Image (cartoon, rainbow, N blue to C red):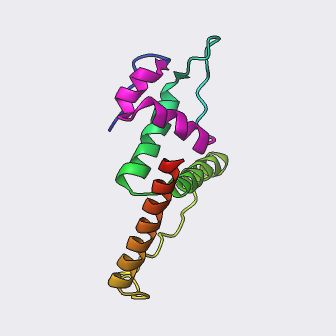
């Protein structure tokens, strides 16, 4: 999604509509991504700048479309940020393309992995059941 800014600052409700997530998700992402720190008004209301919204859209793409975990998305953003900072400091540097294996190694059959995922899921459901009882 291409974001075209129409004003200097946006309220959280407007940003929710642009990014397509709820306000609590935006607030959570602020705790997880140090580079995301929208300023607040005297009353404590967050005001998002166009650069904050662009960052939020990148985070959303990494998490929801590209399938990164939060730590993975944070690492990806740090790599992008450091490469942009390096490019600004120097002339463009040609980096080698990452090698992608044509076929994933068969270190464990898919059925074993599926069995492990199901076991972990069952454990998590048990923990949630115990927490609900408290």
In this picture, residue 49 sits left or right of residue 119: right
> Is 73 placed above or below 38 here?
below
| Residue appearing at x 39%, y 18% in the figure | 6
> Is 3 placed above or below 60 here?
above
Residue 20: horizontal and vertical position, in percent? Answer: 35, 34
Report the front residue among 105 and 4: 105
| Residue appearing at x 60%, y 50% in the figure | 87
Residue 33: horizontal and vertical position, in percent? Answer: 59, 43
Q: Main secondary structure of the magenta part?
A: helix
> Is 22 placed above or below 47 here?
below
> Is 94 placed above or below 6 here?
below
| Residue appearing at x 59%, y 44% in the figure | 32
In this picture, residue 112 sits left or right of residue 71: left
Taking the magenta stretch, the answer to whether it contains residue 52 is: no
Residue 21: horizontal and vertical position, in percent? Answer: 38, 35
| Residue appearing at x 41%, y 66% in the figure | 121
Magenta highlight range? 10-34
> Residue pushed farthest top?
42
């Amino acid at each position: 999604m291409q974001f075209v800014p129409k004003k200097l600052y946006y309220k959280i409700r407007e940003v929710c509509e642009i990014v397509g997530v709820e306000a609590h998700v935006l607030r959570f992402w602020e705790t997880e991504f140090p580079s995301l720190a929208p300023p607040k008004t005297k009353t404590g209301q967050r005001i998002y700048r166009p650069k904050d919204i662009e960052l939020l859209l990148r985070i959303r793409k990494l998490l929801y479309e590209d399938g990164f975990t939060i730590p993975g998305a944070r690492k990806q953003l740090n790599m992008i940020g450091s490469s942009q900072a390096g490019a600004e400091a120097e002339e463009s540097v040609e980096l080698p393309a990452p090698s992608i294996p044509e076929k994933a190694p068969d270190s464990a059959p898919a059925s074993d992995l599926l069995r492990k995922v199901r076991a972990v899921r069952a454990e998590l459901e048990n923990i949630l059941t115990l927490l609900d009882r408290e």
